[in-house]
Amino acid sequence: MNEILKVEHLKKYFTKKRIFGSISTTVKAVDDVSFFLDKGEVFVLAGESGSGKSTIAKLILKSIEADSGKIIFENHEINNEAKNLERIRMNCQMIHQDPYDSINPRMRIEGIVSEPLEIHNIGNKKDRLKRVIEVLHEVKLEPAEEIIKKYPHMLSGGQRQRVVLARALTLKPKIILADEPVSMLDVSIRAEMLELMTELQKKYNISFIYITHDLATARYFGQRIGILYMGKIVEMGPINQVLVNPKHPYTQALIDAISEPDPENLHKVKKIRINEPTDVDVYQGCRFRAKCPYVIEKCKIEPKLETVGDKHLSACHIELD
Ligand SMILES: Nc1ncnc2c1ncn2[C@@H]1O[C@H](COP(=O)(O)OP(=O)(O)O)[C@@H](O)[C@H]1O
Ligand SMILES: [Mg+2]
């Protein structure tokens, strides 16, 4: 078995209290999500804003507690024992969308990049500085000896995201969870950052969970993909199969929305919007049924992920070609 990480039946609901009155609503942010990550693989979690991507990342790192489900890292379930948490936090690093979510603006780059070493009590000051310089070279922030003295605001957005990547690399992690790492960058530097991540991923055989709403970067960087819709994976499989031959109407709509605006596609996207009713309980049956152009009676029953091709799964009652 080549799996480094397994997520089984993960669930996290949030209950939001209304300000007026006593009614509260429950958001099923992550609802029975299962997937695996192979050693050295890039698995993409893709979905629109609010589909539960970041919540899954937080659950894996145990920065929030799941309602139920398991996180299995190198064949051991991660529970809340200190030793266990230390293991996942040493081996699994996070890159956030906004660099300022993980870097302290009042610290110099040296402090920011060496912080994980300090937290885990690794090496002395000299060893740590050596490692900081090393990883700054890795992410091509030059001259590293000058960069370490700077503060984050003295760098460009692209350079700051390289600092975040360097910081994630200091502990030589086995897994990197990258939550929309390039979506705040200018288009012109997005490609550079993706290239750098690809290069380092291959060089150190790092397993990546790449979280994005952008299918173009997903295809560039990833090998397998899970499409999330309202807290559920609706389709999953090898990235070329899923994106070239999507089986789920939601995946098809996502792809249509980004493809070139030919009249045929515009028609499809529009059809999906028109079909939006207001009185459907979204958590009953298929969650996409309110927007799905192919909806049938059976969609009131929740579809399960089933095999539709080689390692390709889709959760839909309708067979689309
Ligand atoms: N701490 C929280 N409290 C209440 N609701 C939350 C919280 N975190 C996330 N949510 C809700 O859970 C859903 C999924 O959020 P999130 O995982 O951030 O989505 P994504 O990263 O895909 O944009 C959203 O509806 C969001 O509003
Ligand atoms: Mg998010």
Image (spheres, grey):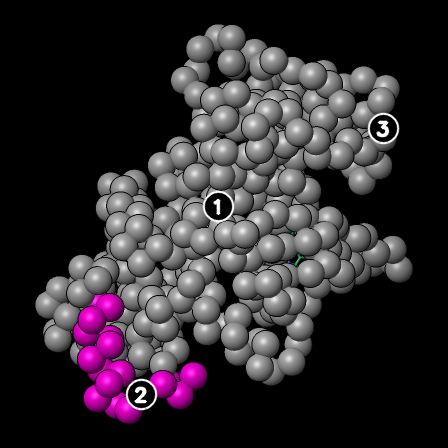
Mark 3 / mark 2, whichever is N-terminal: 2
Q: In this view, does 238 lie to the left or right of 291?
A: left
Residue ID at (17%, 65%): 137
Look at label 3 and name its amino acid. Lys
Q: What stretch is highlighted in magenta?
A: 118-136
Label 3: which secondary element: helix
**Disc number placed over residue 123 in the picture, else none:** 2
For the residues labelled 1 and 3, the Cα–Cα distance comes to 30 Å
Q: Give how far across and how far down residue 96 sits, in percent.
A: 44, 59
Residue 131 vs 28, above or below: the answer is: below
From the image, tell me which residue sits under label 1.
43
User: Marks 1 and 3: CB-CB under 8 Å?
Assistant: no
- The furthest residue to the front: 1
Q: In which quarter of the image is the C terminus?
A: top right
User: Marks 3 and 2: CB-CB under 8 Å?
Assistant: no
Which is in the foreground here, disc 3 or disc 2? 2
Q: Give how far across and how far down residue 198 sits, in percent.
A: 31, 48
Residue 5 vs 186, above or below: the answer is: below
For the residues labelled 2 and 1, the Cα–Cα distance comes to 32 Å
Mark 2 / mark 1, whichever is N-terminal: 1
Question: Regarding ligand 1, which quadrant of the image does it lie in?
Answer: bottom right
Indicate yes or no whether the magenta region holds residue 58. no
Check disc 3: other Cα within 10 Å, few if <14, some if 14-19, many if 20+. Answer: some
**Disc number placed over residue 300 in the picture, else none:** 3
